[in-house]
Image (cartoon, rainbow, N blue to C red):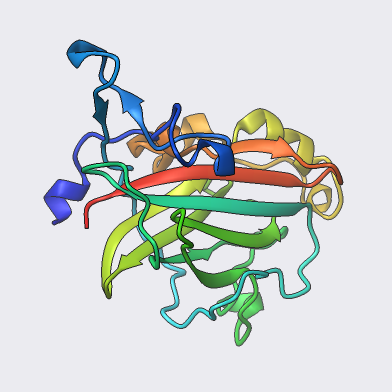
């Protein structure tokens, strides 16, 4: 399973049944075999990192009062073999706060902010309300993600942000109290292993908050 999940992968973009819900699709046209042929490939596997806790709460709002720019995540899970949405997959996300702190560790010890699990709906979509992550030394801004299907982990990865948008957010409070971040996407060692294919598509909603979408193809 590990070898299968680490093969060539990409974001699943284009027209498809998830397009209306997410603003991106789960299909990629295979032009070599005609305009109607559809192929799916796996989203890249990346390291779990040292801050995972296997006890996240089932909840949509994971902010737990942490200050920061509002961010809504809409993450779709599809079967990489046929692009069909997977209903009932458990999507587990965790990330640091605006100050670069993870709950459960160091300054966040004994707390559970910015961690949570959601089940995908009939469209294969899990939605979270959170904040734009901060940064810490040696890493670009990112969110960790795991996908569980039928009790098995079928994907472990990280979600990334366009640097130009992160630069705008980092100039705001409370992010701007820490000075300039030390690592960008281009010089992040983990991002180099497929991160460009796990970039969130970001837009602003009517209230000025960010909405990030991504479709993840997994092997069930």
* 5 sits to left or right of 217: left
Give residue 58's position: percent from left, percent from top.
Answer: 54, 78
State which quarter of the image contains the C terminus.
bottom left
Image quarter (top left, top right, bottom left or bottom right) of the N terminus: bottom left
Looking at the image, residue 11 lies above or below residue 68: above
Corner quadrant of residue 64? bottom right
Tell me the residue at 41%/79% (across/down): 54
Q: Where does residue 55 sit, x and y in percent of width and height?
A: 46, 83
Residue 128 falls left or right of residue 172 = left
Residue nearest the observer in this picture, 180 or 102 = 102
Specify whether 87 is left or right of 178: left
Q: Position of residue 24 (x, y in %)?
A: 51, 34
From the viewer's perspective, is 10 left or right of 113? left
Q: Nearer the viewer, residue 171 or 67?
A: 67
Mark yes or no: residue 103 visible: yes
Looking at the image, residue 15 lies above or below residue 209: above
Question: In this orientation, does residue 140 appear?
Answer: no
Give the residue displayed 46% in from the left and 63% down from the top: 120
Give residue 178's position: percent from left, percent from top: 77, 51
């Amino acid at each position: 399973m590990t070898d299968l999940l680490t093969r060539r992968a990409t974001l699943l973009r284009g027209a498809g049944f998830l397009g209306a819900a997410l603003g991106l699709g789960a299909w990629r046209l295979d032009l070599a075999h005609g305009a109607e042929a559809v192929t799916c490939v796996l989203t890249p596997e990346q390291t779990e990192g040292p801050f995972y806790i296997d006890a996240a709460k089932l909840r949509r709002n994971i902010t737990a009062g942490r200050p920061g720019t509002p961010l809504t995540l809409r993450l779709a899970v599809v079967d990489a073999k046929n692009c069909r949405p997977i209903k009932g997959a458990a999507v587990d996300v965790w990330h640091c706060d605006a100050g670069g702190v993870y709950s459960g560790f160091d300054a966040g010890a004994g707390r559970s902010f910015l961690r949570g699990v959601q089940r995908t709906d009939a469209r294969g979509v899990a939605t979270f309300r959170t904040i734009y992550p901060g940064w810490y030394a040696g890493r670009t801004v990112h969110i960790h993600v795991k996908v569980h299907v039928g009790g098995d982990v079928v994907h472990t990865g990280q979600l990334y942000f366009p640097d130009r948008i992160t630069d705008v957010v980092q100039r705001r409070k409370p992010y701007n109290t820490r000075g300039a971040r030390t690592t960008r996407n281009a010089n992040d060692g983990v991002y180099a292993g497929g991160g460009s294919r796990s970039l969130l598509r970001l837009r602003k909603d009517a209230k000025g908050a960010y909405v990030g979408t991504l479709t993840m193809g997994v092997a069930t």
